[in-house]
Image: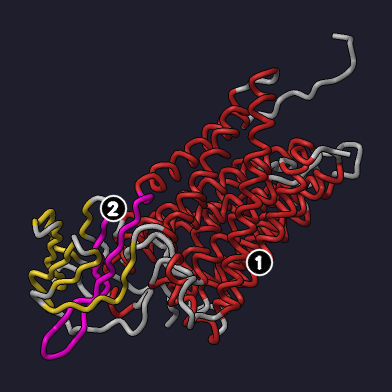
Amino acid sequence: MLEPVPTGYFFLFLSFFLVLTFRLLGWTWLERVLALIALIANGLLLGAIWAMSGHLPVFNLFESFLLTVFILGIIALIFTETSPARSWIRTWIWAEVILLFGILLFYPKIHAPQHFYDKDLYVVLFHLSRTVALAVMLLASGFYAEFLRTSRRSSSQEDSLHIGRNFLILGTILFLISEFAGILWCLNGWGDFWRWNYGFLSSTFIMLYLMLVFHLPGKGLVSKRMTSITGTMNSLVFLGIAVSRSVP
Amino acid sequence: MKPLTERLGSLSLTTITLSILLLWLSGGILLNTSPTFSAGFESMNRTLLSEWLRLPQEELILKAWFVGLCLCMVLLGVNLIFCSWRRIFNLLRKNFTAAKALMLFVHFLFGFVALGHFSGFMFGYRYEDIRLAQGQVFQPTPSHGIKVEKIQMDDAPLTPGRSGRNSSVFDLNPKRNFAEVSITEEGREIGREKILFMTSLRSGARQVTLRGFAAGPDPKVVLAVSNNPTLPYFLTLYPLMIVGMGLHLAITWKKKPQKTNNPTP
């Protein structure tokens, strides 16, 4: 008998793969319809995981990436252009979704076990804000990548750079909220707001990297391209650290 | 040639310092994952760093790494001061906008948050892995005492094998496994509370946290006892910084129309 959660995962993987394919072929209407179906299915799977586990689906990489895809997909449909001829942002985002599903191939398709601290406000806020921050930063990287693609043309999309910056700041705020919740969690559980361990050091790495993106000097094209490159890379840095943290 | 003050407050210096910090931190992450230094990092978690730096048995490489990290942060702080100084004058003299003022405010707050974070490493006290049976007292300072009034253990007791996160400890039902602890000042009780996982006893800047239970014929609780005088400021300024960033984002969400040299309307 088929296990519902892994089956749901593979169905979503295939659906989003088709969404990306339709996007690349320029079949926008089909892409949009299938993306909506995939997102509804994604939402149902998350709801089922929530019901089965008794906690928000944010406590392991499998759950949190499914939620990241759900949030990213919705904000991508709201904030990005429909036509692939005008913008590649959504193409980039569907590719990111495929990357997330690809990473999950190597992880068990199960929900996180229950713990007594699953309902603690700070623990939930830490995981939830981090998941939403990742989704928003992945969206930002799409805008930065679009600017990079068009920056040498006369029709350079300066707006993409500004929107990318907006979403990256929003992602940073969500990340800081998650860090603050983590500080309170640590304070309550360990008696101090900081630990010298991989989790804290890697979070500081993300924060310093974000600071670097926002402080690159200059206003010319080279500087803007550098900002775009580091801005695009940011989501990969965050993703890489999220994956490395999930390795036991 | 640019004057020194301008260089010290430049964005180029910010970028260089942040790049060095990222490399330095990567080195720290590698050290942290290496079995040779993991005990050293555990030791950093157990004591205040002002004391840890003076411990002769600790690894010199780890101390050098920490001092290097502090020096990078000092350079970033100097950069922040000079940059903010220049921007304050610019703001007051000519280009005053709410967005710029907010951004300056956020930078100030960041400076204070970083300072509060560092102060937490240096001031107060921290004792981890304090094992006390019912009725026993621990004195972090001559005038203060922590007394375990009662220990309640219903689940199988599990001793944390190491400092830091221990899943088995966190799997104990907090409603059935707890301790009642009192805190005294000059022999006078100033606080008494039931402490359980994720619920500590707090009295001013002092905190008693339940970290686990030690099994045996005479069951004990494992406590972390700390005092961080800068913690309230840190916990106030951090969210303020986030709010400041949020306001700045809201103000600057829409792109300003670019100025052109074309005089025609």
Residue A8, visible in the rendered structure: no
Q: Residues within 10 Å of mark 1 (few under 14, many from 20)?
A: some
Q: Which residue is mark 2?
A: B205
Q: Nearer the viewer, residue B5 or B181?
A: B5
Secondary structure state at the residue bearing disc 2: loop
What's drawn in magenta, residue-wise?
Answer: B205-231
| Amino acid at circle 2 | Ala
The colour scheme applied to this rendered structure is secondary structure
Q: Which residue is mark 1?
A: B24
Chain under callout 1: B
Select label 1 or label 2 by which is in front.
2
Name the disc covering residue A210, or none: none
Is B229 part of what is drawn in magenta? yes
List the single residue furthest toward the bottom. B217
Residue B88 lies, with reference to residue A180, above or below; the image says above
Upstream in sequence: badge 1 or badge 2: 1
Residue B180 lies, with reference to residue B33, above or below; the image says above
In the image, what residue occupies the spot 60% across and 78% down?
A: B61
Residue B78 point in image, percent of width and height: 64, 46
Residue B204 lies, with reference to residue A48, above or below; the image says above
What's the distance in space between the residues labelled 1 and 2, CA to CA?
32 Å
Secondary structure mostly seen in magenta is: strand
